[in-house]
Amino acid sequence: MSLPSVIPTIDLASDSPQRQAELIKHALGSVGFFAVVNAGPHAEDVEAMFDHSKTFFDLPMKEKEVYLAGKSGSGYTKLLSQALGEGKRDHKETFSYGKYCAKTKQEVPPPFKEDEVAHETIKRFYQDCHDVSERLMELFALALELPREHFRQSHSFGLNTAMSLIHYPALEPEEQKRLSEMDIRAGEHKDWGTMTLLFQQSTGGQPGLQVNLPRSAIDPSFASTDAKDTFAWYPAPIPPRGGFLVNVGLGMELWSSGMYRATLHRVIFPSPSEEEIKAAQEGLADRYTLAFFVQPDDDVAFQPILPGGKIDTSVRAITSGELFDSKLRESMNRFKDIPTSTTVAENTAGGYGIVA
Ligand SMILES: O=C(O)CCC(=O)C(=O)O
Ligand SMILES: [Fe+2]
């Protein structure tokens, strides 16, 4: 069974809200991912964002280093300076906008600062991602029989939600073979927050995102057998132009008492044969993605929601800020212990990412 049929596509322009909520509930209860079409940022803006991202990552290291991320995760992180999963460093560089558009504005890097059009595009993209995430949160609530503002009201505009430009550079096959023994593009992890919107290039981009799913989610007939359920990695689809993927993080999994699943995912290097074919066809291709990490305000407690829209207030639930801090600490400790295939001194000056 091919994956697009298990990662459903939700059309936010034509399905009814009831139907959208039903599809979301089913997707998040089984595979933890779905694709959205006909909503969110304009396709032209998404494409422009990929161009701006390329412009930034093409800058000489000296210029990018000016924006090195601090503990908040905002700013630039170098190749191999994060480890989303166990045992391997991530062969990617990122630029994250933490509190962008909010009161404490982060400084925008030169290619965007000096380019009024680029700057406006980034702001509009952020705003449109925020707006569609609010719509989705209303549907998440509707599907669990909660008041529509239940999740939405816990996310102040521009406060904890962060946006990342991500670049996974293409490598010569030999170099990639050497690196992939010790590193990965993005190690296996669950996101931390409410949800992530992930934009991939619909044409000319490189795939590589994989999701870890139980066989019973891929093949419904399997669920009725006695065989032990096993997990395997499946390639995630790239939605059509203007579309994007959505997955929920650990915060939402806790909040929904597991009715919405945070699914493990990772980004792998292309296999040498695929790489060779691609290289022959179009020259070496890099993978660029844009991620919008929706994260509740720090003091929001993930008070578990029970079936029927009841809230369990009998437990002292972890807050969004506590979960974020503990995940950040965990990822820093994990990172320190991981050897790398390249000179550590050259590559570890970056900060830490927003996700684990
Ligand atoms: O870039 C991708 O395809 C996925 C990135 C991701 O999962 C993350 O940064 O949390
Ligand atoms: Fe992720």
Image (spheres, rainbow, N blue to C red):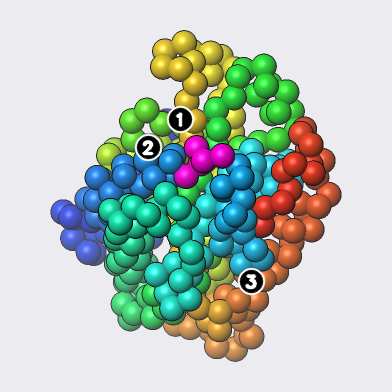
Label 2 – label 1 distance at C-alpha = 8 Å
Q: Identify the image quadrant of the N terminus.
A: top left
Q: Using the image as rendered, state which of residue 163 and residue 18 is in the foreground.
A: 163
Do the residues under discs 3 and 1 have CB atoms within 8 angstroms? Answer: no
Q: Is residue 57 shown in magenta?
A: yes
x and y, in percent, of residue 306 in the image: 48, 76
Q: In this view, does 212 lie above or below 320?
A: above
* Residue that badge 1 annotates: 206
Report the residue at 62% width, 50% height from top.
65
Do the residues under discs 2 and 1 have CB atoms within 8 angstroms? Answer: yes
345 relative to 63 in the view: left or right: right
Helix or strand or loop: what does disc 2 sit on?
Answer: loop
142 relative to 273 in the view: left or right: left
Label 2 – label 3 distance at C-alpha = 31 Å
Which residue type carries mark 2?
Gln
Helix or strand or loop: what does disc 1 sit on?
Answer: loop
Report the residue at 39% width, 70% height from top.
101
Q: In this view, does 207 lie above or below 294?
A: above
* Residue that badge 2 annotates: 201
> Crowding near pointer 3: few (<14 within 10 Å), some, many (20+)?
some
x and y, in percent, of residue 21 in the image: 30, 62
Q: Is residue 243 visible?
A: no
Quarter residue 342 falls in: top right
Q: Which residue range is magenta in the image?
A: 56-60
x and y, in percent, of residue 95 in the image: 52, 52
Closer to us: mark 3 or mark 1? 1
Label 3 – label 1 distance at C-alpha = 32 Å
193 relative to 202 in the view: left or right: right
The mark total stands at 3
Helix or strand or loop: what does disc 3 sit on?
Answer: helix
Q: Is residue 281 shown in magenta?
A: no
Q: Using the image as rendered, state which of residue 137 and residue 292 is in the foreground.
A: 292
